[in-house]
Amino acid sequence: MTWKKFSGEIIQSSILEEVEQAIIRETENGYKLKVCIGTDSQVKGTITDFATVIVLVREHHGGFMYIHQEKSAQQVSIKERMLMEVQKSIETAYSICDLLDIYDVALEVHADINTSPSFKSNKALNDAMGYILSMGFIFKAKPEAFASSTCADKMVH
């Protein structure tokens, strides 16, 4: 799985090593960190572009992110696509959560799902929330889900 920085620079080491080095560097610089993971997707013709982000938020001092993008030709409903986004976020969260526990860094999983029933994505809200919470992660939906609805969104548009 290839990860990159926002600048486009490809991460040469594993994402686990990269996140660990970032945590060490940022905490040594006096920052309290929180990690937010989210995925967004955009259908472009017959292809769906997915972007998963790991956002390291420095309390009161901005943040930075790592990005993984992939494309799928699989045709799915809006609800299935929302749940695919959640699955990608959970897989990423699961791959780094032990590391975050070691360094006592909080973790949130963000879903690009609207809490208002007037939006199509809302059909997946209860399933997504149950999935994320059942995995033991903190769940955030729009408008609090900036990792997916702003950061990952920027990468697929």
Image (cartoon, rainbow, N blue to C red):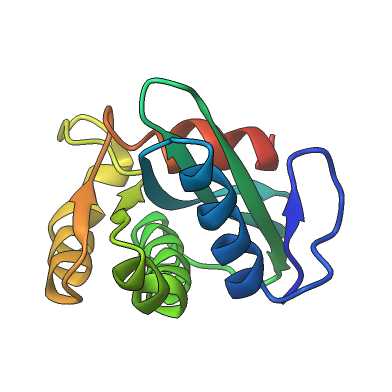
Query: Where does the C terminus fall, quadrant-wise?
Result: top right
One can see residue 100 in this view: yes
Q: Nearer the viewer, residue 127 or 151?
A: 151
Rendering coords of residue 53 (x, y %)? 56, 52
In the rendered structure, the answer to whether residue 146 lies left or right of residue 109 reads right
Question: Is 73 positioned to the left or the right of 65 in the image?
Answer: right
Work out whether residue 127 or residue 5 is closer to the camera in this orientation and state it: 5
In the displayed structure, 40 sits above or below 94; it is above
Is residue 25 placed above or below 85 in the rendered structure? above
Q: Residue at x 16, y 72 (%)?
A: 136
Residue 53 in view: no
Residue 81 x, y percent position in the rendering:
45, 61
Q: What residue is at 36 percent from the left and 29 percent from the top?
A: 59
Question: Which residue occupies the extreme top position in the image?
Answer: 60
Query: 30 and 86: which one is in front?
Result: 30
How many numbered marks does the figure carry?
A: 0
- Relative to 68, 61 lies left or right: left
Which image quadrant is residue 52 in?
bottom right
Determine whether 154 is above or below 88 in the image. above
Residue at coordinates 66% horizontally, 64% vertically from top-left?
Answer: 18
